[in-house]
Image (cartoon, coloured by chain):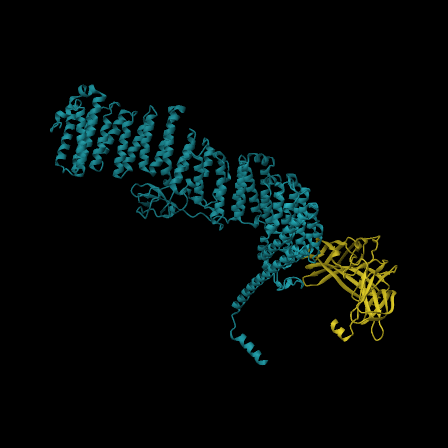
Amino acid sequence: MTRSNNRASGATGTAPPTSATAAAAAVFAAAKASTLDEARLLREALARVAHQSLRMQRQWKGGQYAEAVVAACDVAAELRVPVGVGSPSSTAEDTTAPARSGRLLSPRSYYDLYLAVLQALRVLETSLWSLLQSQPLSVLPFYEHAQHSPYVVARLYPLITVGSVYVRSRQAPAEDVLRDLLEMCAGVQHPERGLFLRAYLLQAMKDKLPDEGGEYAGSAQGSIAFLLRNFTEMNRLWVRMQRDCPAGERARREHERRQLQSLVGANVACLARLQALTVEMYRDTVLPQLTEQVLECQDVLAQECLMDCIVQAFPDALHVATLPHLLQTCAALRVGVDVRSVLTGLADRLGRFARADAAHHTLLREADALQTLLQWVPQVLDSQRAASALSDELQLYRALLGFLLVAFPEQRQHCDALLGLCAKAVSQRLPPPAPPPTSVDETEDVSPPAPTTTSELPPTRPDTPMSATRRRRPSGDGQAAAATPAPAADTDDPDVVPLLERILLLPLHHYTELEALASLAAYPTVMQLLPLENQRALAAEVLRRSLPPGSTGRGVAALPLLEALLGLVRPLLEQMPGEEVMYHRRTGVPYLAVDGELVRGYEAQQHLVAQIVYLLRTDDLRLFVRLRQALLSGGPARTRLTLPPLAFALLRLLRVYRARHGPAACDKLLEFVHQVLSDLADVDASTALRMHLQGAAAVDASELSDDRFLYEFMAHAYVLFEEEIADSRSQFSSLVLIVGTLGTLHRLDADNYESLASKAVKHASRLLTRADQCLALCACSTLFSDVGGGRWEASRALGCLERAARAARSSVAPAERALLLLDVLNRAMLILEELHERAPDTARDAAPNDVWDDFCRFTADTVDSVRDLLTRLEPDASGGKAAAARLARALAYLRDVRELHEGVFLRLHGGAA
Amino acid sequence: MNAALEVLGVSSPCVVSVELDAGEHRRVDARRRPIYAPAETVSGTVSVRVKSGRPLAHRGIQIECVGFIDGLRGRRHTRQELLSVGLRCEEADVIPAGEVRRYPFAFVDIDKPYDTYDGINVRLRYAVRVTVQRPQPYHPIVEECDLAVQQATPPPDLNPSIRMEVGIEDVLHIEFEYSHSNFHLKDVVIGKIYFLLVRVKIKRMEIEIRRRENVRGLHSELETVAKYEVMDGAPVRGESIPVRLFLAQYPTLTPTYRSVAGVFTVKYFLNLVMIDEDDRRYWKQHEVFLWRDAKDMA
């Protein structure tokens, strides 16, 4: 004895497991043992159910009906097994109970057992029913027999089964049977067992409830009373599951209660399915009783689930009729109940209801649904403020707004109020925003214009790799940097931002009129809660929806509306802290960048901004002035894109303006255009140059007698050309444009024209390459040959061409030389022809002979030079063939109109061949 | 066994059987005894069949109708005769082997004042007894045929309901109500139990039918005839639990006997028992009176 004790203590002492692992192992083992026990318990119970069920069927076949009913009781007796959550010690049942291990079944396992029992009871039901079909028996003895079992659970299940047959056989009024069963079910006060029992009662009876148009006689009132009572009892049992719950078990218990939630909810669903349920009945009886129960139970989980269930189960029309009551109930729910999701569900349903049918609108209106909602929702929320997440609250606002917009789109003030609530909700939940970071632009070193960053262009123009330089703008850009950072970006909840976006998109979808949107004062406030990127995307969406062709709106005709619109799209207009401007190294075009990286996609948004001007359906200049001011705050990267449309719109306005307000008023407009173009000139010289030319053309076309502005625009174009265009290619193209425009202007004073034209020639001859010089001079030659414009100065045209030819001859490459000379030749032929056609008499006779001769000789010389060049060119030189072909075409043309070009042929050294 | 006894020559030489009139049409009680009304005539035929091989010499055959109360007091068996009416149907004679003799009998107007009763300590029996006296040293041959006597009583004039409020202060307070205090044997006990205060975790609640058998005031025996669970789980305040107990399912129930020949009394009680989580029992017992309704006799 002594020895064995020693051995035992030695054994425990030799390998002591560390306490932690031992504890963990013990817990694990216990958990495993518990599940194993539970599985075994269930298995045994199922086996017994199967056995008793067989016995029942055998006895039934043998005609021992009473014994069969007793056997059914034995089957149901298996449901007496202990169920629930609790310490095993407290569940010691009496010795007759089937639980031998002292363990518990979880509700899930109990449900399996329940299903097995139900299957057996179904057999009983069908057997009894077919027996009744074949023999005129009374059900009453069966009904009594079922009550002979000494155990309450065991007798109530078969009693319900027999009771359902009793109702079906119509031997007793359904109402009486229902009442009796309902009363008897009170015998089971155990939460889980009672819940399942009553669930079975409901399941067995739900198709046998007397109803309007139903097959069982009786009043629907009785059915309603039955369902309400059953609901009440089930709810009480359900709530009781939570009672006396130790703190550690709470979560698990709640989980299990949630699993059983549908059992309770089935009553409500069944109520909702009753045909006889009228609005009056619902309002006066059903809902008050339901809500009374909900409020009475004081249980968070139950209140949450049941309110949701009520909202989802009953038809919308009933909700509309009882909205105040429902909301009042919501406000009275306990703190901690997720009332928002309930309200969200309600608002969503009402929204769908309103959308489904136009008739529903009037119904909603009559019920004053909106007023009620708006009156109650803040109260409800106030009662629950501390308890739930921001995203839930926003979800609610989203649903409400959706409903509001569908059902009462004209009630904009309410929509605005809701948005205000949203903003309040968000700002209340968030810490005060940090002070805005100082702008990068202001702290940056002024000096280095050298390229610091190289990056790809946005994908809109993928073919031109660009190197950009950062350079500090002198002023204006940093002003907008004071905008507050988006507070919503600070929250941890990932749902908040998308929800806010959805909320903000809702009015966009419903209000096609810009006025409607603009009247929502809180809209921009809510918008500012978003991160900048989202704000911009949203602002772009606003524009996309209001701009033609998407828009059906009337446009913007008044200043306040424009202000509102600008407020809405402010994130797109203004430069935000951290943003900087990078200039294209070659063209000097500004782009938007953050941290040295180009901002992708901003151009597409800015194109939308640029289109705002097309919304202006007015000739009130103040609007345009305001718009310009707004656009300027965006910095050069934006104004580059947004100012040209403004200028174009103003120029288009010019004609209308002149007709309406007279030529004098046009000065103001043109001054403004000029101002806009000077703004643009700071940003993008080459575009500004072109815009000036456009301006000139527009002024010319508007038939203003005064050429002040015409000259001004042209002069500025020249200035821009001289000061800003450094690149030789753009110099050439700009000059050609200037010359082209100048040639079309008719209203310039002769002196002004002369000075501009001679300036053009001078610039042309100063271009960088010979080829450019040659071609530009050729273009200039038309400036003096415009016969119709009365600027016939053949000698100056010839002078231009001669200089062009000289430039061409200075070109080094022979093929290029030949091609350039051919250009000159073509131009000369053109002028000759023009001289001849426009004024044949003047050309041949009245004009000084020497000029005509000079032209002819010059043309002939040019032809000779080309020929000469071509003979010296190697035949397969690349340009040679083209040049030869062009020469051949030119000569062929000369021959075609030989009488005209007689003078030329006479002077050709090589003849006309 | 019989064959063995026969070889030894000690087995009964004849077979005595009692056949009651209309035996197969008569109602029988739980022990399958034919039931007679108190004043009903008991008639029938006794047949004595002498086994082949040996004639039976007897000293007279007597048929009696007897009634008595068997009791058990301490270890002593007591018997009190209530009734003994006899008739001698044959004087001493020798019945040849293999012969069957029949003796019809009828006990008219005998009073059987008490119901048959089978209790734990006391038993009230009626029987038709046939005694074949034999010469010494043989024991007489006795054959008994048990009868059951049941009498219907008229419904009680007053049948008040039972309503009581009981409880343990600050622990449990209930009010119960039974529809009647008198029940006939096929009756249904209908009742309700209201929980006014529940501070204990009750696991279940049962109704027990208990029978108290009191033999001449000296000792009494309490026996639980039936247990019927009426509630499963713990109720809360305000709960009302229905009771519906079909007495017909307990065939051993008898009417309440206030005094049977001054020997014993039988009383019935409904006992409401609540059992809490720690298996403590809280109970309230209340006497009910059972009676036999004439309808049950039909």
User: From what the image shows, is residue A368 above or below residue B6?
Assistant: above
Of A136 and A896, nearer the camera is A136
Residue A794 location, x and y as percent?
20, 25
Answer whether residue A298 is visible to the viewer in this image.
no
Q: Check the picture and name the quadrant holding the N terminus of chain A.
A: bottom right
Residue A45 location, x and y as percent?
61, 60
Residue A644 location, x and y as percent?
36, 35
Of B19 and A895, nearer the camera is B19
User: From what the image shows, is residue B89 above or below residue A199?
Assistant: below
Identity of the residue furthest to the bottom in this view: A2
Answer whether residue A887 is visible to the viewer in this image.
yes
Of A443 and B148, nearer the camera is B148
Q: Check the picture and name the quadrant holding the C terminus of chain A.
A: top left
Q: Quadrant of residue B209?
A: bottom right
Of A147 and A741, nearer the camera is A147
Q: Count the marks: how many? A: 0
User: From what the image shows, is residue A835 above or below residue A225?
Assistant: above
Give the side of residue B187 with respect to residue A635, left or right: right
* Figure chain in yellow: B
Q: Colour of chain A?
A: cyan
Residue A797 location, x and y as percent?
21, 27
Give the side of residue B20 with respect to residue A463, left or right: right
Give the side of residue B282 with respect to residue A295, left or right: right
